[in-house]
Image: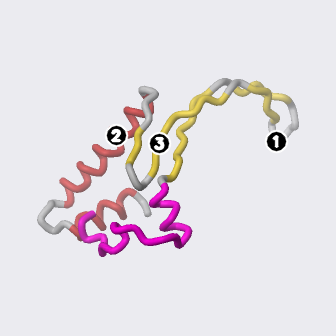
Amino acid sequence: MTKSELILRLAALNPHLYQRDVERIVSTIFDEITEALAAGHRVELRGFGAFSVKRRDARIGRNPRTGTAVEVAEKYVPFFKTGKQLRDRLNGGVDTPEDDDDDDDI
């Protein structure tokens, strides 16, 4: 699902909201998650998962085309760990009370 598909679905499920307002809400949520990660914070969405930042040390890599050694600088990368409820739903585990909903309240 793309961001625009998410916006369309949320707008369809909430006809009392204008699509531009739903777009602003979704963008604000993503912006807040991005800003928190950029500041080095962890973002946890209960039942869904947690976003964090992991540090990758500098290393010597290889250019796949030529095979020559290349220095790769230290960098920080986003990391996502799924929550238990999401893992259970993906793996066909026991239904949780939230699973009984028709997702009308997204």
Please, what is the three-letter code of the amino acid marked with disc 1? Pro
Q: Residues within 10 Å of mark 2 (few under 14, many from 20)?
A: few
Which of marks 2 and 3 precedes in the sequence? 2
> Residue placed farthest to the right in the image?
67
Verify CB contact (< 8 Å) between mark 3 and mark 2.
Answer: no
Q: Position of residue 89 (x, y in %)?
A: 48, 67
Q: Left or right: where does residue 42 sit relative to residue 16?
A: right
Where residue 72 sits, quadrant-wise, is top right
For label 2, the residue is 31
**Mark pair 3, 2: CA separation:** 13 Å
Q: Secondary structure at mark 2?
A: helix
Q: Residue at x 34, y 67 (%)?
A: 98
For label 1, the residue is 64
Q: Position of residue 40 (x, y in %)?
A: 46, 28
Q: What's drawn in magenta, residue-wise?
A: 84-106
- Mark 3 vs mark 2, foreground winner is 3
- Mark 2 vs mark 1, foreground winner is 2
Q: Is residue 103 magenta?
A: yes
